[in-house]
Amino acid sequence: MKSLFAKLSAALLAIVILMGAAFLAVDRFQTRAYYDELSQKLNAPIAMYVTEQRQLIENGVADLESLRELSGHAMVINPSAEIYLLDTDGNILGHSLSDDAVQLPRVDLEPVLALIDGTAQLPLHGDDPRSGLSKIFSAFPVQSESGLEGYLYVILGGQRYDELAGDLGDSYASRISAMAVIAIVLFTALVGFLVFRLLTRRLQRLSCEMERATASGFTTQPGFGEIRADGDEIDALSRAFTEMSDQIQSQIEQLKENDRLRRELISNISHDLRTPLSAMQGSIETLIIKGQAMPDAERDRYLRMARKHTVRLGTLIGDLFELAKLDSASVTPSVEAFSLAELAQDIAQEFQVECERKNVSFEIETDCGTAQSLGDIGLIQRALENLVKNAVQFAPEGGEVTISITRHDASVAVAVADNGPGIAEKDMPRIFDRFYRALDGEEARSDSSGLGLAIVKRILDLHDSRITVTSKVNTGTRFEFELPLCQQAA
């Protein structure tokens, strides 16, 4: 009984059986209560009729002979009737039964007085002196010239009634009631099983599709078909599992791509570290081997070569540490208001010497006046330095580099442009990848770590800013991003 259908069916069967048993019990109780009420109403005058026939008590003395005679007449009307004479305190003065048949010497008068008063709700039960149980009765006061002498107390369901009631448990009516209840139980259970089968069939299909998708490693989509947008909880669960399956599949593909990029990154790092290290090792070994025999000019050339590769190695390691730090959760931008125009002026001064060496003009175009932006000034400076460094490096002899700062309604746009060789269309999707170089041959930058644009993108990601690039071969390249405008300063 592991399936949901089996558990629900067993629970339904148990509930229906309990309901059937409860119905039988309630039916028998209700039938008995109905019979008691009807019998008490029909036989209520018996005590009055008997009392009117004879003076059964006079001066506290019971006429037992008359009582026995009248009891015989009463039993003709109701064979189950048992008659008792009570005094005003409820003590039994006489009866028509054998002395050893009566167990109670006294009867509680409260229900007797309530019946005689006519205010009680029927059926009303009183003490049965013979069995000690509570049974329906008829009662009437016994009067004489001197006043109230006692009460005539008639049990309407005596021993004969109990014998007949016990036999009725196996009667035709009882069998019909039991068979009707059993039929209702079976019919209800059958309908419930069919309903549960229809409901659990969708759950079973959902379970099978979930197991199939899980067994495939979420490489296959669950086949739920069309899921109604306004469906029930099962439709909502199917939709949620489909979305989860898509997300897991996407994450698996992303993990595979990350693993590929990780292997590619390690390969690129190994290559980029090996090149300057090999060059440095070659230069130093040459200096050691030739020693003093090497001319000063040649020794100086090897030392400069070793220093150049040392700087390149330091730049590469520094960029790697910086990118690793930016990728970690330890870097949170310290947002403050600052002027992009002033920052651009500072960066222009940093590259002034290199621009003069290459005869490259450096222009700053701005229309934002004193407007300030919101961001981490240190990180934004690093991003701009990387973009300007690329632009100056790729700008041709006598070329130009431009920083444009434009104010919008809620932001400030920054663009860095050059008129260099541009980027081929096939390289555009990968220019922000780590260690990716869009140019080869003589145009490739030998001192580049291949991490500059990756650092720029990561910095702007931390600022929730998107960087865009437009480029045309042999015309130039333009990088642009936006920062929020500081409204208070504006």
Image (cartoon, rainbow, N blue to C red):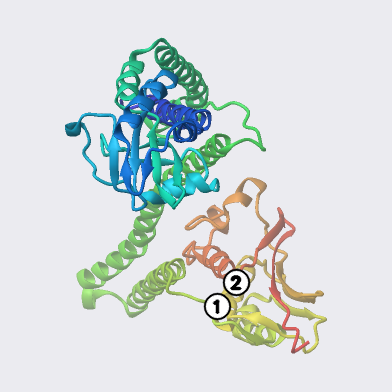
Residue located at (24% from left, 45% from top): 105
- Can see residue 209? no
Q: Position of residue 155 (x, y in %)?
A: 37, 33
Residue 106: image tag: none
Q: Secondary structure at mark 1?
A: helix
Residue located at (50% from left, 76% from top): 332
Residue 379: image tag: 1
Residue located at (16% from left, 33% from top): 100
Q: CA distance from mark 2 to mark 1?
A: 9 Å
162 vs 155, nearest the viewer: 155
Q: Which residue is mark 2?
A: 463
- Closer to us: mark 2 or mark 1? 2
Residue located at (40% from left, 44% from top): 151
Residue type indicated by callout 1: Leu
Q: State left or right for residue 161 relative to residue 203.
A: left
**Quarter occupied by the N terminus:** top left
220 vs 283, nearest the viewer: 220
Instruction: Give the vertical position of 167 relative to 7 (above or below).
Output: above
- Residue at the left extreme, as displayed: 100
Specify the quadrant of the image occupied by residue 183: top left
Q: Secondary structure at mark 2?
A: loop
Dot placed on the residue nearer the N-terminal end, 2 or 1: 1
434 vs 2, nearest the viewer: 2
- Circles 2 and 1 in contact, beta carbons < 8 Å: yes
Residue type indicated by callout 2: His
Q: State left or right for residue 381 relative to residue 137.
A: right
Mark 2, Cα crowd under 10 Å, few <14 / some 14-19 / many 20+, is many
Instruction: Give the vertical position of 230 relative to 393 (above or below).
Output: above
Specify the quadrant of the image occupied by residue 8: top left
Q: Position of residue 280 (x, y in %)?
A: 31, 68
